[in-house]
Amino acid sequence: MVQTRIRKFSVVALGGIRLVNGAAALVVPRFVAARLGVEGQPGVLYVLRLFGIRTVVLGVELLFLSGERLEQSIRVAPLIHASDTAAAAIGGIRGQLPRRAAVLTTLLSATNTGLALLAQPAKGAQPPHHSTAAAGPRPTLSTHRGKDGKRYDTAHNGSVTARDRAVD
């Protein structure tokens, strides 16, 4: 139960961070460049916009997808953020980024890497669903053969059972 809560929190937190940072880089790249201390460098606005749209898409995936598509986004998240962390650290070590920008982006990317690792499923864990409490439990499906020999599927949602539907 605790691991499920940590996992859900990590997915939503990482999705939110991605969405906010990506939107900022996409919509106000000059502001982001100034905060990083890289304003005025050739190509920086272009690169920030590239980073921005990629990061917005990654955030939207975590916040709005479900099922296998969400799981795929969660599985690749550590690789994405670990490579971002390494790129920021290497850029700082080689002097390709100002010290402040290198430290800030390395710490942010390392935080994202940590969240991405916490979002990984435990063996046999269910994927985090982004459903509201009002949506209720997800229906289960059972299959049986009727007296007529046809196969029927029945949806069960808590105490309510939907009508049988012939599938043959």
Image (cartoon, rainbow, N blue to C red):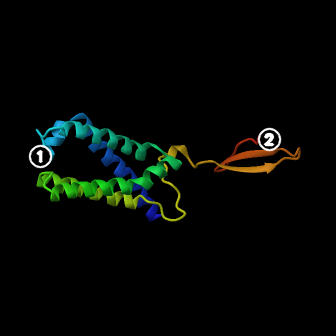
Task: Say left or right for 121 vs 109.
Answer: right
Secondary structure under badge 1? loop
| Image quadrant assignment for residue 61 | top left
Residue extending farthest top: 27
Return the residue at label 1: 37
Amino acid beneath label 1? Gly
Of residues 113 and 144, the one nearer the viewer is 113
| Image quadrant assignment for residue 168 | top right
Of residues 107 and 16, the one nearer the viewer is 107
Q: Residue at x 35, y 53 (%)?
A: 80
Foreground tag (2 vs 1): 1
Return the residue at label 2: 168
Secondary structure under badge 2? loop
Amino acid beneath label 2? Asp
Q: Residue at x 15, y 51 (%)?
A: 97
Q: Is residue 66 above or below residue 118?
A: above
Of residues 69 and 141, the one nearer the viewer is 69
Residue extending farthest right: 148
Neighbor class of circle 2 (other Cα within 10 Å; few <14, some 14-19, many 20+) is few
Task: Say left or right for 47 vs 4.
Answer: left
Neighbor class of circle 1 (other Cα within 10 Å; few <14, some 14-19, many 20+) is some
Q: Position of residue 43 (x, y in %)?
A: 18, 38
Upstream in sequence: badge 2 or badge 1: 1
Q: Residue at x 26, y 58 (%)?
A: 86
Q: Position of residue 81 (x, y in %)?
A: 32, 54
Callout 2 touching callout 1 (CB < 8 Å): no
Residue extending farthest front: 94
Q: Position of residue 150 (x, y in %)?
A: 84, 44
